[in-house]
Image (cartoon, coloured by chain):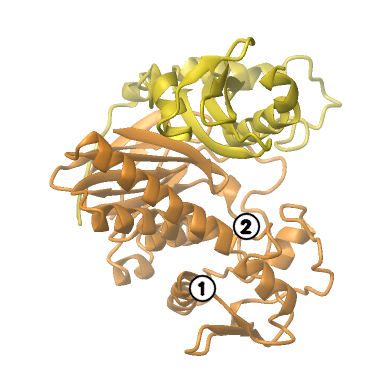
Chain colours: A orange, B yellow
């Protein structure tokens, strides 16, 4: 059974196998609810979300967040350290400056990075500089992981969750994986069992220095940057490293048990 | 985790993207998902159904990237969106079709045109457009929900 709903700024699709219709409906509804909770907690656009509250007040006073938000911030902290700062979700100022994110109530925000974020053990978040966090590069993957966990808890044994390029499969069979090439078609790239794959394009990524990852006037980058990893939160975050470095052999992929490759629409280059 | 990469893919395969619509559910299933257990009667306008439990379901379609997305919106008796389900998502025509629609943006340009992505040539994004259009569609339906209800 397959169902889809517009969430997380994309179309989230959930497919489950091997369950009765009623059980599948219930499990899928619970999984969508988990995805929608991630959206409510981690939306940059919502001033009342955990991220909205962090960006508005954590520079002045600690902000207590939901355990899921705390988990994603921990992932972000680990990734920031493991990639020498290449993965940085505290560059909200740059997105605002470029008009990619709204500035409502964020006039105090200044440039900076994840080094300004403090995560004490009690789920309260502090900022030592007035930076803005945007979890857009990692929360979608986490939402996919939560959806899979919810389906598993409901007794589902085989499932696929796909949130606009962030995909995770669970079950005993190998699932064929296609990658969408920017401006092109779908390319078969392999098969995956009990794992996650995330695909990004350079158009969707801004690098650490805040530059768009493509210089104006250059021809559009028609490559798709994919990372396969045990969890979707890691796969999602590591696509940003692949876009920035262009190097599927960057050591950070191996340290997370991940594999990276870049696809193009006239030939496919695969490197582990 | 088990990942089996396809090491070599013939270039031609790109030209044969899987075609056709993805149907997630029927209109009836969508209505039942939105208002479980209710029965439905036509409200007099095409695609608008009244639920026995109160509220309406509107079956609508919006343009995604190149193709229509058919979806259902449930509106409570109070006029609030209750639930949205995607019924049918038509994506993936061939490579050429996608290309043609993108290339057509270049028609009429000349040397004084900027010819820059995101300046005068629209970026091709993934599903962002689909969702923007669905959001716009829902906003329109909610705005019209009083008149759609009839009576």
Q: Residues within 10 Å of mark 2 (few under 14, many from 20)?
A: some
Q: Residues within 10 Å of mark 1 (few under 14, many from 20)?
A: some
What secondary structure is marked by label 2? loop
Relative image position of residue A142 (x, y in whole percent): 43, 60
Please tell me which residue is depicted at 33% across the width and 21% down the height of the picture: B12
Q: Nearer the viewer, residue A169 or A269?
A: A169
Please tell me which residue is depicted at 59% across the width and 30% down the height of the picture: B55
Instruction: Find residue B136 and report its image quarter.
Output: top right
Residue B20's mark?
Answer: none
Confirm or deny contact between disc 2 and disc 1 (CB under 8 A). Answer: no
Residue A206's mark?
Answer: 2
Relative image position of residue A210 (x, y in whole percent): 68, 63
Instruction: Find residue B129 and report its image quarter.
Output: top right
Task: State the quadrant of the N terminus of chain A.
Answer: top left
Please tell me which residue is depicted at 33% across the width and 33% down the height of the picture: A2
Name the subunit of mark 1: A
Q: Is residue B41 left or right of residue B23?
A: right
Question: Which residue does the numbered mark 1 point to in the structure image?
Answer: A66
Relative image position of residue A154 (x, y in whole percent): 25, 54
Q: Is residue A266 at least partly visible in the picture? A: no
Q: Is residue B62 left or right of residue B87?
A: right
């Amino acid at each position: 059974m397959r169902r889809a709903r517009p969430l997380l700024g994309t179309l989230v699709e959930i497919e489950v196998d091997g369950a009765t219709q009623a059980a599948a409906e219930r499990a899928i509804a619970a999984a969508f609810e988990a995805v929608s909770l991630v959206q409510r907690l981690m939306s940059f656009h919502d001033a009342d979300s955990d991220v909205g509250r962090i960006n508005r007040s954590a520079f002045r006073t600690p902000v207590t967040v939901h355990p899921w938000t705390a988990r994603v911030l921990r992932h972000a902290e680990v990734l920031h350290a493991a990639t020498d700062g290449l993965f940085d979700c505290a560059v909200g100022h740059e997105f605002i400056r470029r008009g990619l994110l709204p500035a409502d109530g964020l006039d105090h925000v200044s440039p900076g990075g994840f080094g300004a974020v403090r995560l004490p053990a009690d789920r309260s978040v502090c900022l030592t500089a007035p930076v803005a966090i945007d979890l857009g590069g990692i929360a979608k993957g986490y939402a996919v992981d939560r959806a899979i966990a919810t389906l598993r808890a409901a007794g589902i044994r085989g499932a696929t969750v796909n949130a606009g390029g962030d995909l995770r499969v669970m079950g005993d069979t190998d699932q064929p994986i296609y990658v969408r090439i920017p401006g092109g078609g779908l390319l078969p790239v392999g098969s995956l069992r009990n794992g996650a794959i995330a695909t990004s394009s350079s158009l969707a990524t801004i690098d650490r220095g805040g530059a768009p990852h493509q210089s104006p006037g250059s021809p559009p980058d028609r490559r798709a940057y994919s990372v396969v990893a045990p969890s979707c939160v890691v796969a999602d975050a590591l696509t940003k490293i692949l876009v920035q470095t262009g190097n599927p052999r960057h050591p950070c992929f191996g340290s997370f048990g991940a594999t990276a490759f870049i696809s193009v629409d006239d030939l496919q280059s695969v490197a582990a | 985790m088990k990942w089996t990469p396809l090491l070599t893919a013939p270039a031609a395969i790109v030209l044969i993207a899987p075609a056709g619509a993805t149907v997630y559910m029927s209109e009836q299933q969508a209505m039942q998902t939105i208002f479980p257990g209710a029965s439905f009667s036509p409200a007099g306008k095409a695609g608008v159904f009244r639920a026995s439990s109160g509220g309406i379901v509107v079956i609508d379609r919006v343009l995604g990237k190149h193709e229509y997305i058919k979806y259902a919106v449930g509106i409570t008796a109070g006029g609030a969106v209750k639930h949205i389900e995607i019924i049918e998502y038509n994506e993936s025509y061939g490579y050429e079709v996608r290309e043609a629609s993108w290339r057509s943006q270049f028609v009429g340009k000349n040397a004084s045109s900027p010819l820059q992505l995101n300046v005068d040539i629209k970026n091709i994004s993934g599903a962002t457009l689909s969702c923007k259009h669905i959001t716009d569609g829902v906003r329109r339906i909610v705005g019209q929900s009083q008149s759609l209800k009839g009576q």
